[in-house]
């Protein structure tokens, strides 16, 4: 059972409200974790919670908010600690 994943979202995902959308969506699903912009133009996020909620969030990230255009998503198992509420982090 996967209880945390790290995702990299590529495409038009910066400057379109993608991070705020992720925070709102992940919070609504009861997930813990974080989201941030990366210097290469992608968005990185970690989602921790019930497997079905993680899967739902992953699927939602493929579309994102209306102004975004997701080209591809990479996902990785996350083994580091994830605590507290879902939040936006500074850019990386």
Image: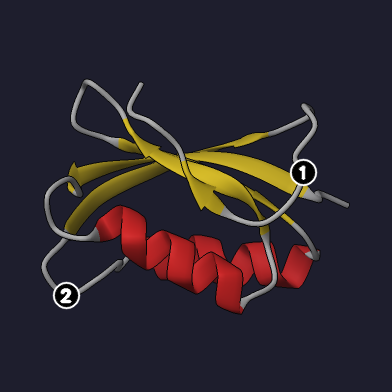
Residue 89: percent from left, percent from top: 45, 37
For the point 38% across and 45% down, the residue is 73
Q: Which label number is shown at residue 66?
A: 2
The answer, for residue 17, to whether it is visible in the render is yes
Element type where label 1 sits in the image: loop
The answer, for residue 46, to whether it is visible in the render is no
Cα–Cα span, label 1 and label 2? 29 Å
For the point 27% across and 58% down, the residue is 18
Quarter residue 44 falls in: top left
Quarter residue 37 falls in: top left
Who is closer to the viewer here, 30 or 70?
30
For the point 58% across and 70% down, the residue is 27
- The crowd level at tag 1 (other Cα within 10 Å; few <14, some 14-19, many 20+) is few
Residue 28: percent from left, percent from top: 58, 78
Quarter residue 81 falls in: top right
Element type where label 2 sits in the image: loop
57 above or below 79? below
77 above or below 4? above
Foreground label between 1 and 2: 1
Q: With 10 as the anchor, is 54 left or right in this view?
A: right
- The crowd level at tag 2 (other Cα within 10 Å; few <14, some 14-19, many 20+) is few
Which residue, given by chain and number where applicable, does mark 1 sit on?
Answer: 83
Q: Which label number is shown at residue 8?
A: none
Task: Please tell me how many numbered marks the rendered image carries.
Answer: 2
């Amino acid at each position: 059972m996967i209880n945390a994943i790290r995702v990299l979202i590529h495409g038009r995902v910066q400057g379109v409200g993608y991070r705020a959308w992720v925070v709102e969506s992940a919070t609504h699903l009861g997930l813990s974790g974080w989201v941030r912009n990366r210097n290469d133009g992608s968005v990185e996020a970690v989602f921790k919670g019930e497997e079905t909620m993680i899967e739902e969030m992953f699927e939602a990230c493929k579309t994102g908010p209306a102004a975004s255009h997701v080209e591809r998503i990479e996902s990785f198992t996350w083994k580091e600690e994830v605590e507290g509420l879902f939040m936006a982090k500074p850019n990386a």
